[in-house]
Amino acid sequence: MTSNSNQHRLTTIWERYNSPIIWLLLVAYLALVAFLVTVVFPVEFVDRSQSGFYEAQAVIAFGVIGLIGVFLSMRTGFPNAWDAKIANTQRLVIPIAAGLLLGSLFLATDLITNMSLLQEEHLNIQSTDVAFPASIFVYSAAAIFVEVVYRLLTIPLLLALISVIVRSQGGRETVFWILAILTSLIEPLTNTAASQYLPPLTLTFVMVQSFAANLLQAVFFRKYGFLAAILLRVAFYIPFHVIGSFLK
């Protein structure tokens, strides 16, 4: 009886708190990656400012900020990261497949337009990507960092603040879609360097793809939880950055 009671208690804890538990596991992974890329095999980043994300204080800061976002998401209608009502196909398979497809499309666009080559010439660098095998760790961790800024904190925080005024469920869903669209514009609109070396038509096509990938992440966040959104971007980076480093 005691064994069954303990098992039931553990199951209840997992069902209620799997989101913060999974987030803390992701933060532990960030700490591991930070140790690997700074101590075990130091990485020379294309943009030196990127190395700051892999310092201990940055990992702690992103961990805390992300945890706030996780708790806010639990209070604003987002499903838990491992919600029992969501199938693993929805939570894992669909986001990974979508990410691989979108990343492959982005890589094809890059190869056709010579986007990375133009960027290398513009910035006078040898490569736009971190070399393999460090790229596996760097870009999977980058997906987590990016998610905190673009969605995990931003959308639940703004949704929580606006929900003080907008009380109806339908109104809150409308607010979510507005926030999803606006936050999905952050990445394409802040990539101002691309406008200096890409023709207008190519730049527009790249921005549309970036917007679509971000919007799909926001949708998956709302429907399947933040883990699904992160997995989409991790999968996106595999063809574009990891495999692409050999092709660009």
Image: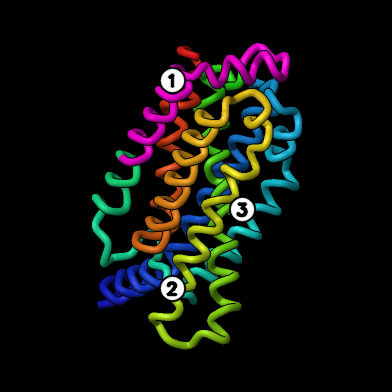
| Residue 33 numbered tag | none
Magenta-drawn stretch contains 116:
yes
| Circle 1 crowding by C-alpha within 10 Å: few under 14, some 14–19, many from 20 | some
SS at badge 1: helix
- How far across and how far down the image is residue 192, in percent? 67, 37
Give whichever of 2, 196 is nearer the camera. 196
For disc 1, the marked residue is 243
SS at badge 2: helix
Residue type (three-letter) at the residue carrying disc 2: Thr
Give whichever of 164, 188 is nearer the camera. 188
Q: In this view, does 225 lie above or below 174?
A: above
Query: Magenta part of the protein: which range?
Result: 98-127
Asked if residue 179 lies left or right of residue 11, the reply is: right
Which quadrant of the view contains residue 134? top right
Magenta-drawn stretch contains 245:
no
Labels 1 and 3: the sequence-earlier one: 3
Labels 2 and 3: the sequence-earlier one: 3
> In this rendering, which labeled residue sits more in front, label 2 or label 3?
2
Q: Is residue 53 above or below residue 65?
A: above
Q: Cα distance, mark 2 to mark 1?
A: 38 Å
For disc 3, the marked residue is 149
| Residue 174 numbered tag | 2
Q: Cα distance, mark 2 to mark 3?
A: 21 Å
Q: Which residue does the image show at 72% across and 14% down from the upper left?
A: 124
Q: In this view, does 199 lie above or below 68?
A: above
Q: Which residue does the image show at 38% across and 29% down from the upper left?
A: 105
Q: Is residue 149 above or below residue 83?
A: above
